Image: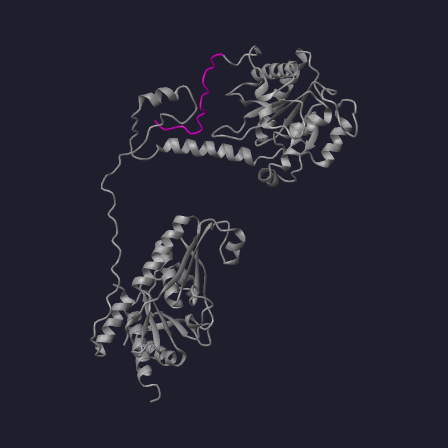
Amino acid sequence: MSRTRSLMAQLRHARGENAPLVPTMPLPRVEAPPARVYVPARETTSTTAAAAAKHTTALLGIGHVGTRYATDVVLQFQAELAVAHSAVAAELPDEWAAQHGFLPLQSQATSHREFLLRPDLGRRLHPDSLARLRKDAQRGPQNGANERTLGAGPDVQLILADGLSAIACMGSGEQLFAATKAACAARGLSVGTPVCAKFARVWLQDEIGAEVGAKVAIILLGERPGLGTGDGLSAYAVYGPKIGNTDGERNMMSNLHARGIAPEEAAPRLAALAAAMIAQGVSGVKLDLTGIGAGGREYRAPQVRERLVVRDA
Amino acid sequence: MLEPILPNVLAVKRIPHASADVLRAYGADPSKHTSLGLITCDQDDSLYVALDEATKQSDVDVVFGQSFYAGASHASGRLSGEVLGVLAGADPQIIEDGLTATLRCLAHDACFYDADGKGTVTVFPHVISAVGRYLAADLGVAVGEPIAYLVAPPLEFVVALDAALKAADVRSLKIITPPTPTNFACAYLTGVNAGDLAACEAAATAFAAAVVDVALQPTR
C-alpha cells in the first residue's frame, strides 16, 4: 500500500469520513526466480560436433554452461569481433599508394564514412583520379573519344584496393600484387601500370579496366572482415571490363591470407584464371574451369582458429 | 473528501534507437543514451514522482519533464494531458524497466486527492520515503532522503504550507509560487534532521488537512 495513500486514509478517518474508498488495483504478481541453479562447468554433449570442429574454424563443438556459452568462448568471440570492427574502421593513408610504387587512385567517395554508407560511390572513379589514370597509366590506342578497344591495352590490369579492410591491403596486399604480377608475366601476359585505389568497391575494376583497354581486370581488395579475420583479401577477375558488368561475369577467390590461401599459392591460380579468360574470351559463369590445372582442388588442411583469449587451466 | 483522484496515463511510447538530434533536443546525451521512453499523463506532479521512482528501479535518466500551460483541462490534444516525461537509457530494456516502474507508481502510489468532496479543489500531499536520482538532483538533496512533495492551488497553498512547516521539524528545499504552467503552487520539504521520514509525513498530513479546511470555509 502506498504510504501517502494510507496517510490520507487516516486523515480522512480522523475527519469523520468513513465511506469506503474505491479499492485500488491489485499489484501485479512478481514471478518467482527459476528453481534450477546451473553449475558453472562446461557441458559438451555432442562428440560429432567436437569431431567436426577439428576441420573448420566455424564455431562448432564449443559446449555450453547451462543454457549459455562458456566464458572463454564468449571472450574469444568478442575479441574476434573487435578484430573485425577495427579492420572495417581502418582507413588507407592517402600517401600509402605512392610510397609503395602504385599509381594512387580514389573512388568518388570523399570520406571513409561515406565510402561505407554509399557502395555506389565506391564503384566509380573520382574525376581527378580518372584524369590521372588517363595521363599516367599505360593504355591502349584511342578509338573515338576516350573509348578503347578491348585488349588494345595490357592483357591484365592489376588493381590493389582497400575495400572493406585497409589492414589487409597494407598487410599482404603488396606481396599478393607482386606475386600475381610475376605469375602473369611468367605466362607471357602483359601487365598494366600498378594502381592502388582508395575507397574502392569491386566494380571499380570495370571503369579502370575499360579506361586502359585491358583484356582482363583483376582487383585485389580487402574483404569484408569476419570473426578474427581482418586481414583477408579477395581477388575478383573479369574479362572485358566495362561499366555495367554484373557479378555473373566475375570470378573470385576469397580468404587470401596467411591462414587461408597464401599469396604465393593464390598468384599462380589467378594467373591461370586470367589466361583461361583470354583463351576462352569469357569470364564468370560462362568460363569453363575444367582443365585449368592451377591447383586448389586437392585436400587442404583446415584453417586453425587463432586463440585471442587463453583459458586458464 | 480526500478520495484519491487517480492519474490517467494517456500515451506511452518507446523509441529503441532515437536519432541524435532528437536525443539532444530533449536533454539526452547521444554518447550514453540510445533509447527513449515517452509518457503523457493528466497529472503532472504524479508523473514527476513516478519518473523519480523509475530512476530508483532502473538505470534510466529522466531527461525531460515539463508541464503544459493551463493543465490537463486545456490540453493541446487527447493524448497530451498536462505533462510530457522523457526517459533516456542505454538500451531498450532499461527503458522498459523504467516505464514499468513509472506506470506502477502512477497506478498505485502518486495521485492527487479531492479536497472539497466535489473535485473542484485538489491537493497533492505526497511523501517520498526515499528520493530518487531525478528529484534529488533537482532539489540538491542526497539520493535516499525522505521528502514531502506538496502541491495545492495558489491561496490554499499559502495557508497549507505555513501549517505544514509549523506541524513538524521540517525545512523547505524549494518553493514554487504561482503563476506556474498549471497555476498550482508547489513546495518540497525535508526533515531538519536527515532521514526524518516521520516529520515529512506529519507535514504532508497537516498540509492536506489545511487545504481541506480552506476548501470547506474559503471566506471565513
Quick one: quadrant of the N terminus of chain A?
Answer: bottom left
Give the dominant element type of the magenta stretch: helix, strand or loop.
loop
Q: Is residue A130 left or right of residue B72?
A: right
Residue A71 visible at all = yes
Counting from the top left corner in percent of width and height, residue A300 is at 47, 14
Picture quadrant of residue B123: bottom left
Image quadrant occupied by the C terminus of chain A: top left
Q: Residue at x 70, y 36 (%)?
A: A126
Q: Position of residue A32 (x, y in %)?
A: 24, 47
Is B190 on the left or on the right of A13, as rendered? right
- Look at 58% across and 40% down and name the residue there: A117
The colour scheme is one colour
Q: Nearer the viewer, residue B142 or A291?
A: A291
Image position of A115 with respect to A309: above or below: below
Above or below — where is A211 with respect to B25?
A: above
Give the residue at x 67% y 27%: A242
- Residue A163 vs A289, above or below: the answer is below
Magenta run includes residue A247: no
Q: Position of residue B196 (x, y in %)?
A: 30, 67
Which stretch is magenta? A298-313
